[in-house]
C-alpha cells in the first residue's frame, strides 16, 4: 500500500486543506525558549522500515522534541532494569493534566505512567541511580539508537525549563517525600530538563523511533535498540498514554501508537510499516499539536492505515 501512495503530494494536499481551516492553539509560551518559535512552522516526514523517505515543509528544521524524548529514557530504563521499572511507575492513562499534583498525592507518589511529567522524572531517577554519567550515557544511547552522532541537548532550552520548572520541582519533591525519588532532586531534575531539551528534525525523529515499528531493531542502522517483547510494551503504553489526557481521542481519530511533545512535535508508529512525524508548534488546550493531530487523522483515515 505504501508504494502506491505519493506521500509527498498527499502531505501537500492535506496541508493545503488545513491552511483554509481555522488554526487554533498557541505555542508553549510558559517555557520562554519555546515562546520564540515561529507558530506557523509545519513539517512532516514519513520513513518506512525499508528506508524510504517522504517529506514536506519544514521537516529538516530542528525543534525541541520535549516529551517525545521520554520514550527514549523509558527505553533505556527498561534495558537496564527490565520489569523492575513497573514497581515505581504505572502503565495506566492519567485522565488528568500531564503535570497534576493532585493525582500523584492521592496515589502515594506512584505516577500513573512514564510519559506524564512525574513518571518521566521517576525514570530519570532510575537512570541517575544506574548510570555513572547519566547525561552523557543517555545521550550516547540516543545517538546509537538513532544512528546519528550529531544529536545533542540544548543548554538554552534546559536552562529555560529550569528557570520556570516550579511545578516539576514540586512533583519531584512530593515523590521524594513518598520515597519514590531515591537521588538528589536537583540531580534528577537536571537530567529531566536536559532530556526534554533535545532538538531534532522531523526526519531525525522518524529515523530514531523506527525501532518501534521494526520489533526493536532500527532497520536503517541494523542496530538492536531493545527486545521485541519490550517494544510491544512501549507501543502499548504510547497507545494508552502518549497524548496526556487526550490519548483516547488520538486512538479514536488516528489509530496509531505515538507520543507528543509541547514543542509541537508528534511521532506515530505503524508496526511493521513506518514512523511518521509532524511538527506544528501551536498546541491545543491539553498540550498536543492542533494541526499535528489533524494531519495524522487525515493520513490514517484516507490511506486506511490505522492499526484498528
Image (cartoon, rainbow, N blue to C red):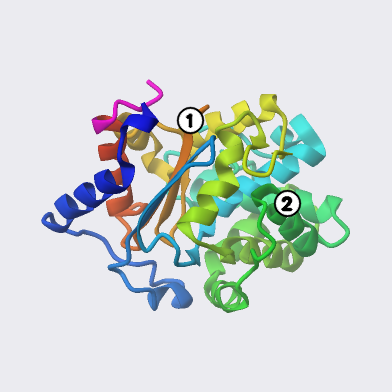
Instruction: For residue 184, say whether it is visible.
Output: no
- Please indicate whether residue 71 sits to the left or right of residue 132 in the image: left
What crowding class fits label 2: few (fewer than 14 Cα within 10 Å), some (14-19), or many (20 or more)? Answer: some
Spatial CA span between label 2 and label 1: 22 Å
Of residue 269 and residue 59, the one placed in the foreground of this image is 59
Tell me residue 75's x, y (percent). Answer: 68, 42
Q: Earlier in the sequence, mark 2 or mark 1?
A: 2
Write down the residue under mark 2: 144
Query: Is 133 inside the magenta-drawn segment?
Result: no
Q: Name the image quarter holding the C terminus.
A: top left
Q: Which corner quadrant of the image does residue 249 belong to?
A: top left
Of residue 193 and residue 223, the one placed in the foreground of this image is 223
Where 208 falls versus 216 (above or below)?
below
Tell me residue 40's x, y (percent). Answer: 28, 68
Magenta-colored span: 302-308
- Residue at 53%, 64% (x, y): give it: 167
2 and 1 marks in contact (CB < 8 Å): no
- Residue at 48%, 42% (x, y): give it: 52
Tell me residue 131's x, y (percent). Answer: 85, 54
SS type, badge 2? helix
Write down the residue under mark 1: 273
Query: Is 304 inside the magenta-drawn segment?
Result: yes
- Residue at 58%, 53% (x, y): give it: 69
Where 307 falls versus 249 (above or below)?
above
Tell me residue 88's x, y (percent). Answer: 71, 39
Q: Main secondary structure of the magenta part?
A: loop
Of residue 69 and residue 4, the one placed in the foreground of this image is 4
What crowding class fits label 1: few (fewer than 14 Cα within 10 Å), some (14-19), or many (20 or more)? Answer: some
Amino acid at each position: 500500500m505504501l508504494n502506491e501512495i505519493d506521500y509527498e503530494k498527499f502531505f501537500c494536499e492535506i496541508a493545503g486543506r488545513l491552511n483554509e481551516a481555522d488554526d487554533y492553539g498557541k505555542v508553549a509560551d510558559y517555557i520562554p525558549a519555546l515562546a520564540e518559535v515561529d507558530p506557523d512552522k509545519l513539517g512532516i516526514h514519513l520513513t518506512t522500515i525499508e528506508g524510504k523517505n517522504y517529506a514536506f515543509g519544514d521537516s529538516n528544521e530542528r525543534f525541541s522534541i520535549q516529551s517525545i524524548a521520554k520514550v527514549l529514557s523509558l527505553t533505556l530504563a527498561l534495558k537496564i532494569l527490565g520489569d523492575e521499572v513497573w514497581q515505581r511507575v504505572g502503565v495506566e492513562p492519567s485522565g488528568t493534566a500531564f503535570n497534576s499534583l493532585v493525582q500523584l498525592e492521592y496515589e502515594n507518589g506512584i505516577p500513573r505512567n512514564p510519559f506524564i511529567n512525574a513518571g518521566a522524572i521517576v525514570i530519570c531517577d532510575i537512570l541517575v541511580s544506574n548510570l555513572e554519567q547519566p547525561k552523557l550515557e543517555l545521550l550516547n544511547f540516543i545517538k546509537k539508537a538513532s544512528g546519528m552522532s550529531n544529536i545533542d541537548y540544548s543548554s538554552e532550552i534546559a536552562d529555560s525549563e529550569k528557570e520556570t520548572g516550579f511545578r516539576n520541582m514540586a512533583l519531584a519533591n512530593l515523590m521524594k517525600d513518598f520515597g519514590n525519588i531515591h537521588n538528589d532532586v536537583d540531580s534528577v531534575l537536571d537530567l529531566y530538563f536536559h532530556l526534554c531539551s533535545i532538538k531534532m528534525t522531523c526526519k531525525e525523529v522518524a529515523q530514531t523511533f523506527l525501532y518501534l515499528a521494526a520489533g526493536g531493531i532500527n532497520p536503517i542502522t541494523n542496530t538492536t535498540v531493545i527486545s521485541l517483547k519490550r517494544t510491544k510494551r512501549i507501543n502499548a503504553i504510547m497507545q494508552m498514554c502518549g497524548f496526556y489526557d487526550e490519548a483516547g481521542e488520538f486512538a479514536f481519530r488516528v489509530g496509531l501508537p505515538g507520543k507528543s511533545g509541547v514543542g509541537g512535535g508528534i511521532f506515530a508508529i505503524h508496526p511493521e510499516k513506518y514512523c511518521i512525524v509532524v511538527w506544528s508548534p501551536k498546541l491545543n488546550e491539553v498540550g498536543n499539536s492542533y494541526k499535528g493531530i489533524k494531519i495524522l487523522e487525515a493520513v490514517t483515515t484516507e490511506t486506511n492505515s490505522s492499526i484498528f
